[in-house]
Image (cartoon, rainbow, N blue to C red):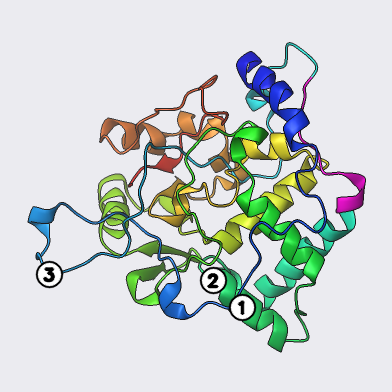
Amino acid sequence: MNGRRRFLAVCSALTASLFAAGHARHKLVARKPAMAEFVGPPAPPAAAAPAAKVNKYAPVISGLHPDSFIADNLAPQLQPVKTAPPVDIMLEPGQRETFESVRARLARLQRYVGFGNFNVIGWDESLRHARKQSRVGAFTAAELDFIEDLFFTNADTLGFYGDKVVSRLSATVARQDIVKIAGSGHYLFKGQPLETYRRIRRDVGNSIVLTSGIRSVVKQIHLFLNKTARVDGNLSLASYSLAPPGHSYHAIGDFDVGKRGFGSRNFSAAFAETDEFRRLADLGYVDIRYPRDNPFGVRYEPWHIKVV
């Protein structure tokens, strides 16, 4: 973590105005549906698909990076090692009101559309619901600026060194390309993600459950803001335990599994001690590529199934 903290110390001066009000690098404009960027698992090898078929889920990815767990509490054994006073990026006092209003509005949107639909909802669709439904309420100009600043911020300045796999805030998930997994409230992409999950269930058994599937940009924003609130506005620490918006491989095919009845421990190192994890490892479904002290600025996660 020393290298991570030194990097943050160098960058802190450049990011002091991270979410300054009035920022207008990427103003929202009305977009036609045809212009939306679709996200999902990459296209299969050319030999495995008809030459005429075009798979719109084919983002350019320069490397792989896991998502980090979504449990609210930070287990002591998973806390980052701090040998020097941290230099973290924090929410500024003047940003707190907007931060809380965005969290509250997204929570109302989630209640309105339902938990499952919120996992795959797009940003433009979210804006339409917010404008039309008084129970949600239209996003204010300050809230829109805050969300855009968060999405377009260079995650390296937060100490997160993974790839940005979704580059547009308006990225969408096509409903015809996804399947809702019964009893989970989550969706998976058809094709390799769904086939992988079905094989896991067949090979490991019904004690394995889907704990997190597709996460749209909107869902990842909501998760990241809630995580930031849990760590008292520390954006750097939030990014250590959850991928910033646009950086989650859940948006393009990966998913999480856990042990039935294991609760929040499924998102902790305790999952690696279960028979289910050992079975997953024995069968080759789990590849721990990011152990503790990995260079990507995230924590160890044995529950993540790599598909992409």
Q: Is 142 a magenta residue?
A: no
> Comparing marks 2 and 1, which lies closer to the viewer?
2
Q: CA distance from mark 2 to mark 1?
A: 9 Å
In the rendered image, which residue does mark 3 sit on? 52
Q: Residue at x 65, y 14 (%)?
A: 2
Give SS at disc 2. Answer: loop
Q: Residue at x 61, y 45 (%)?
A: 264
In the rendered image, which residue does mark 1 sit on? 113
- The region drawn magenta spans 86-95
Residue 154, given in percent of the width and then of the height, sits at 61, 41
Q: Is residue 268 placed above or below 171 in the rendered structure?
A: above
Kind of residue indicated by mark 2: Ile
Front residue of 269 and 255: 255
Question: Pointers 2 and 1 in contact (CB under 8 A)?
Answer: yes
Q: Is 92 a magenta residue?
A: yes
In the rendered image, which residue does mark 2 sit on? 121
Q: Residues within 10 Å of mark 1 (few under 14, many from 20)?
A: some
